[in-house]
Image (cartoon, rainbow, N blue to C red):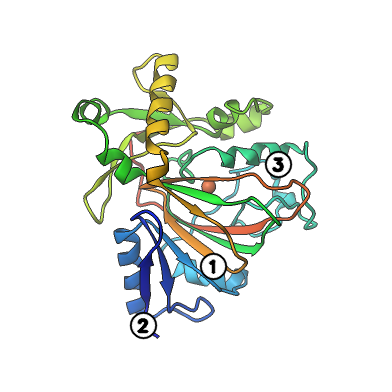
Amino acid sequence: MPVKMRQIGPCFAAEVEGIDMRKPLSPDEVATIHAGMDEYAVLVFHDQPIDDEQQLAFTGSLGELEHSTGSSLRAPEEYRLPNTFADVSNLDQNQKPFARDDRRRLFAIGNRLWHSDSSFKVIPAKYSLLHARSIPSRGGNTEFADMRAAYDALDVETKAEIQDLICEHSQIFSRQQLGFTDFTDEERARFKPVRQRLVRVHPSTGRKSLYLASHAGSIIGWPVPEARAFLRDLNEHATQREFVYVHRWRVGDLVMWDNRRTMHRARPFPAHEPRDVRRTTLVGDGPTAVQVD
Ligand SMILES: [Fe+2]
């Protein structure tokens, strides 16, 4: 069956038909998916009844997998999934929803702020692939914002001002915004800030985009309050409705997005209901900025 893509909502999202993730991809299918990701930035595949092995195989056929060790507050012995997955569910290792005040849950609520996956890592994520195994009765949408369109819509003065700016990203900054400051010394060391460019050039298309995330808490050379106010303004600009696609999940959906030119956020849902969504991630090509110890 030929692969077909159909734009949905804003121009950066499309639905894909003709891919069966239970089977190995042909070289043509791999090329078509990468071309689709370059043309759009969010691809939606419905009705994919895959297991973990099939999700890993599908992801691995598109590039190198990112490992999630140390990115959350789950201790290694509490992992529900192998570290080739980012477990963004609300479930513990016994498949039970976290208690409402569980600090692993409260930390994960940071995903409800706009972000780009792994921007807090020196080499941030390229694509994320999120598969829905079970979904809550209401809520739990994922929203995506088009950082290329947001960049294009800036005035020339702002484009010139931000062209060479470098931000510091850390999960400590994003959680601080929600009043979560309860980190151990070990966690503070593990989540130490990394540097990222504020404007990225997409390696395939050559187009510029804003590289924003709630993890960004400072701009090198700027006073902190001024940097945070400026980043807040940019985030407000970049997440206006005209730049946003809302994904309403069905079980079996796999949504793939390019973290280099989109942001996303999870929406709330009833805390006691399971939301089993499993993310595999491709690592990016390299750092976006020189790091300083
Ligand atoms: Fe995310």
The label number, if any, that marks residue 105 in the structure image: 3
Q: Residue at x 35, y 43 (%)?
A: 147
Q: Residue at x 38, y 80 (%)?
A: 26
Q: Nearer the viewer, residue 287 or 145?
A: 145
> Badge 2 local density, few (<14 within 10 Å), some, or many (20+)?
few
Picture coordinates of residue 203, whole percent (x, y): 26, 52
Give the labeled residue for mark 1: 56
The amino acid marked with disc number 2 is Pro
> Badge 3 local density, few (<14 within 10 Å), some, or many (20+)?
many
Q: Within 8 Å of ligand 1, the CB of disc 1?
A: no
- Disc 1 is placed on an element classified as helix
* Foreground: disc 3 or disc 2: 2
Mark 2 or 1 closer to N-term? 2
Q: Residue at x 36, y 70 (%)?
A: 5
Picture coordinates of residue 123, whole percent (x, y): 41, 45
- Disc 2 is placed on an element classified as loop
The label number, if any, that marks residue 2 in the structure image: 2
Mark 3 or 2 closer to N-term? 2
Q: Nearer the viewer, residue 147 or 269?
A: 269
Q: Which residue is drawn at 56% across and 73% down?
A: 48
Image height check: is 197 above or below 77? above
Is residue 293 among the parts visible in the rendering?
Answer: no
The amino acid marked with disc number 1 is Leu
* Foreground: disc 1 or disc 3: 3
Mark 1 or 3 closer to N-term? 1
